[in-house]
Each structure stands twice: as structure tokens, then as C-alpha cells.
Amino acid sequence: MVATISEQNSVSVAKELAIKIEHLNFYFGTGELRKQVLFDISLDLPKGQIVILTGPSGSGKTTLLTLLGALRTLHEGSLQVLGKEIVGLPDKALIPIRRNIGFIFQAHNLFESLSASQNVETSVELTRNIGEKRQLAVDMLGQLGLSDRVDYKPNALSGGQKQRVAIARAMVNRPKIILADEPTAALDKASGRDVVTLMRHFCEEAGTTVLMVTHDNRILDVADRIINLVDGRLESDSDLETQTSRIS
Amino acid sequence: MNFTFLKRVPLAWLNLTHDRKRFVTSLGGVAFAVLLMFVFTGFMNALYDSQIQLLTKLNGEVIVINRLKNNMFVPASFARRRLYQVRAFEGVADAYPFYISEGAWKNPETGQSFSVRTLAFNLGDPVLSLPAVNEYIAELQLPNAALIDTRVRPEIGPTEAGIVSELADRRIRIVGTFELGTDFASGNGNLVMSDVNFLRYFADRGPEEDTRSFATADLGVVKLKPGATVEKVVAALQQALPADVLVLPRDGPDGFVTRERLYWQENTNIGFVFTLLTTMSFFVGIILVYQILYTDVADHWAEYATLKAMGYSNAYLLGVVLQEAGFLSVLGFLPGFAVSYLLYNAAAAATGLFFQMTSERVVNLFVATFVMCLVSGVVAVRKVQSTDPAEVFGG
Ligand SMILES: Nc1ncnc2c1ncn2[C@@H]1O[C@H](COP(=O)(O)OP(=O)(O)OP(=O)(O)O)[C@@H](O)[C@H]1O
Ligand SMILES: [Mg+2]
């Protein structure tokens, strides 16, 4: 058994990639107003890796995240998400790809009218697993330390709790990829730390690939790898796994 | 069939009702538009329906009138001997003369005079299908006795047996009441009396007024024998009688009742004005509901965009907004309908007009309300569709 797994590991590296980017360019606007935002990006994200993306404001971090999340149509270069090429796909074809990806935003974006559990259930409903949705949502919230808050509406929760509900919503379907844009920006230091630690814990366990944009230097240590983007170009890419060996 | 949608989180309902105050205001807005539509269509229908109230109570299948009387407002009468001729025709059971005249009624409390319409007939003839009138035949035999319509306009004064007042400057005593209602030709209300009493008041009212006698009648009400065909009798009568009279069936598309209704529809602006007002209310409703739905979309822009980023299609979001529109139409219609119902009763009491809330009219207005909300929903939804899921990033 062990032998087969390691064999696979060494044989097909390409299969192990969650995201593969080659020579990707991206522009905003058309005609005269056309402005290139991302320049010739090539990047491989292996499965299970936790990557932090940093860079100055306006460097294109959020834009890159929306591309990886299949939120925009693409025309130049190559972008494979979980083995599927998405450059050239029309908007409609992107919808099913999004269902494999969990998104976490700076704002929690929870429906005020729905309880914590119902907000998470909207995500489960996408998988048609309607019968078990309540159970799955409650379990997920429980694992994030919110078992006594499942039926609270968002405005009865603290900022950190709301962000944890948003994380539960993103992770409840066990997506292969999590994309997070400054998830701790609206939180104080302690709750920001908690949220990131929880995310790391779950993703490690489930083998989820995480790409997280952050300006918060205090949480860089959760990453396996740090990528720096400047003016739409990859500036540096440091793999921390090689330096600090991690037990896995 | 797949009923999984029943177990879905009822996002539309929860979004709509989350803010109670706003929800109640929204329903109030829809209810108000519904109320406006009910009021305007109500007045329009009441004005038309009222014109034919008396006509539908005439107890005969065929009506004879002066050819010049193209609506009830025209005081043209015809020679009563025509009705004797009519009685001789095959299929005719009887032909009753019916007398109508305007006269000044003095309000017994204020002493002010108002015009009312007097309806009269031979007490032996069953001319009117008004049970109340037939109960008072004995009392109506008395000189100067009359029945008063309980649905006269308030200016007329109290309407009950025992009231003594003046009609055309002569004493009159009310011996009972009946229920009919006002129309354009009736002035402020109706009185019913015997033909003998009718002559007491209207035979000779002075040089400026028409003199009335039994030589002329205003309407001829022709009762057919069982089994007689209305069309045949009408054709035969019209063929044989001189052209100064017109013979019409009472009912049917070419009948006397429909003719009267059409006259008012074609010769007044009622239809145009009230249809315009109703249409305006409809559009006010569309704008109101659009505002409500658009506010929901705008306030939850980031959340809806998040749903799209999670992998929900536009169709799901369309569904949410259209469901909200559906809830608003049903829940807004109910209070609007209830208030309109009360208002119809109040308006009927105040004007003497005939306000009818028929199930057909209620269903029509509900459909209008539903369409109103749906149109708003579709317009608001175009906003949601344009939601760019990439916009949620970047806060
Ligand atoms: N919708 C858009 N239309 C046109 N230009 C845009 C749009 N969104 C972003 N840009 C531009 O693209 C560039 C990259 O923006 P992006 O939001 O990706 O930066 P960022 O690295 O996330 O910055 P920050 O750290 O401030 O969030 C900026 O110059 C920005 O002005
Ligand atoms: Mg950004």
C-alpha cells in the first residue's frame, strides 16, 4: 500500500498539481483603455500546499485570485484548475468549476437573514446533498468552535465568529482549493490568528490547497510557501518547506 | 417529481421578512397599489352597473320604447295604445305600461329640494321584479302614498315609512321602502307609486313642465307566454308596429340592458378616465415593487455575488427575486383586497351607486397584481444578473 502511494507520487507530478499556470496575461478594459494587470505568470501549486501571496497594493493579487477561482473569462496563456483548462471557456462553463473551490473574502458576506447554519447550508445545497445538509453544516461549525452558535443570526456574532462561519461555508463541501483574500483584515490580532490556525489545521487534514492573500506579517508562518507579486509580475517564490521541515 | 426545493433554505422568504418594519412597509405599498386599482375599477364598474340596475328589474322579456329614447336620460314617451296592439300578438301574455318622471323632492328635515325619479305602474301589473315593492301593493293604493329607495343619496333625508314631505309641491307620504340605487338618470334617488298617484303629481305641473296622462307611457314591458321565442316576437312586433316605437329584447347582446350600458360606455369619458387611472396605479405598483426588490438586491449585493462565486447560476438568483415578487403579490393583495371591500361598501352607501365585488373582478385584479410584481421582479433581476462574482473580492 505504502509503496503504491509513493510510486504514484513520484510518477505523475502533473497529476498532483491543484493549479498550473503558464504564461498567463490578463487585461482590464478594451481598446484604448485596455490595461495589462498580470504579465506572463507561470506558477504551479501542488495539492495540499498552503501558499501566501503578498505584494504591494495594486500589484494584482486580488485579480490573480479571481482568475484562479474561475470568476473571470480568460483569453491568453494557460490556466489549469484541478486538471481542467479554463482559458477560453465561456462564463457558463466556469460555473461548475467554481463549485470545487472555497472562497473566503475580507468581508464575511453572510446573509443577515439566515442563521449561521443556514448560511453554511446554502453551500451544501450546491452538492444536492439536501438530506444531510443541516448535519454537515452543524458538524462543520462545531469543528470551528461554533457548536453553541449554529442558530444565531450573523449580527449576534462577533467579527471573528462571523469570519469562522464564512470559513465553514467555504470548507463544508471539502473543496480541493481554498482561495482567501485578506481573511484576517477585519479582525483583531488574536481572532485573526485563531482563524488562520483553524484554516491551516483543516486544510492540512483534508489535503486542501490554499492560496491566501495577506498583508499581515504576523501570520506568514502558517505558509508552506510565500509568493511575492509586484506590478503584475512574480517577483519571488520561496518554498519554506525546504527550509523548515514539516512533519506530514 | 423532485421536491428537494422544498427543503432548500427559503432565502427569498427570509430576505423579504428579515427586516419586519421594511416588510410591513413593502406590503403596505403593494396593498396601496391594489387598493387604488380596486377603487378606480370599482368606480368605473359601479357607474356602468348602476345604469342598468332598474332595467334588469323589469319583469318582461321584450321592451317597447319611443325610438328617440336612446338612453334612459331621454324623457321621450310613446302612445300607450301601441301596447294594446302588442297584446294581440301571438306569444305575448301581457304588455304593461311603465311611467317615469323627474320631480322635486323636499328633504323633510332641511326643507331643501332635490330632483328624484318617480317610477309608476298599474298596481295590478307585476312590472318590477322587486319583492319589496310587491309587498306594499295595498298601501300604495292610498292617495299620495309612495315607496322610497333606501339607497337614495343622503341629501334626500331619512328613508323610512311614515315620513311626510312634498313631491312636485304636493304632499306625499312614504308608506314603505325598497332597494334600488341611483344612476345618471335617476337624480338623487327613486320613488315608486301607483299610476293613479303618478297622475296626481305629474298630470299638470304648470306651463313650463310636460303634462302627463295615461295616453303615453315611458316603457312598455312585454311579458311573453311560456315557450314563445323572444327573437321571433321582437321581429314580428317591430314589423307590425309603426316606426315611432322601437322593440328590443331585454337581455342578450342586442338587448335593451346592453344598449344602455354601451350608451354610457361610448358617450362618456368614464371608461377612458378610469382605465387611465387604473393603469397609472398599476405602474405606480410596478415602481414600488421594483424599489423594494431592487433595495433587497442592492443591500445584499456582496452576498448575491458570493453565491455566484460559490457556483450558483443566474437562474437560481432569478428564482430568489421572482419568489420575493410572488410573496409580495399574494401578501400585498390580501390586505389591499380587504380594505377595498370595506371601501366598496362605504362608497355604495355614500353614493347610492352599485359597487359589485364579483369574483371575476377580484381574480382579474389579482392577476394584474401578480403581473405587476412579476414585471418589477424581472427588471430588478437584470441587476442581479449583472452582478460580477469577481466584484466581491477586493472588498
Ligand atoms: N474591475 C477593474 N477594472 C479595471 N481595473 C481594475 C479592476 N480591478 C482592479 N483593477 C486594477 O488592476 C490592478 C490590480 O488590482 P488588484 O485589485 O488585483 O490589486 P491588489 O494587489 O489586490 O491590491 P490591494 O492589495 O490593494 O488589494 C490595479 O491597478 C487596479 O486599479
Ligand atoms: Mg486586493
Image (spheres, coloured by chain):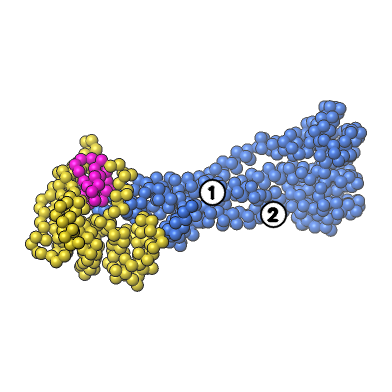
Q: Position of residue B288 (x, y in %)?
A: 47, 50
Q: Which residue is mark 2?
A: B349
Q: Nearer the viewer, mark 2 or mark 1?
A: 1
Q: Which residue is mark 1?
A: B369
Tint applied to chain B in the drawing: blue
Q: Earlier in the sequence, mark 2 or mark 1?
A: 2
Q: Position of residue B297 (x, y in %)?
A: 39, 52
Please indicate, yes or no, whether residue B395 appears anywhere in the rendered image.
Answer: no
Q: Residue at x 86, y 27 (%)?
A: B240
| Cα–Cα gap, marks 2 and 1 | 27 Å
Q: Position of residue B359 (x, y in %)?
A: 64, 50
**Circles 2 and 1 on the same subunit:** yes
Q: Position of residue A78 (x, y in %)?
A: 20, 43
Tint applied to chain A in the drawing: yellow
Tag 2, which secondary structure?
helix
Q: Residue at x 22, y 47 (%)?
A: A80
In the figure, residue A91 lies in which quadrant? top left
Please indicate, yes or no, whether residue A145 appears anywhere in the rendered image.
Answer: yes
Check disc 1: other Cα within 10 Å, few if <14, some if 14-19, many if 20+. Answer: many
In the figure, residue A177 lies in which quadrant? bottom left
Q: Is B112 positioned to the left or the right of B272 in the image?
A: right
Magenta stretch bounds: A59-88
Q: Is mark 2 within 8 Å of ligand 1?
A: no
Q: Is residue B21 magenta?
A: no
Q: Is A238 positioned to the left or the right of B376 in the image?
A: left
- Which residue is at the front of the view, B131 or B121? B131
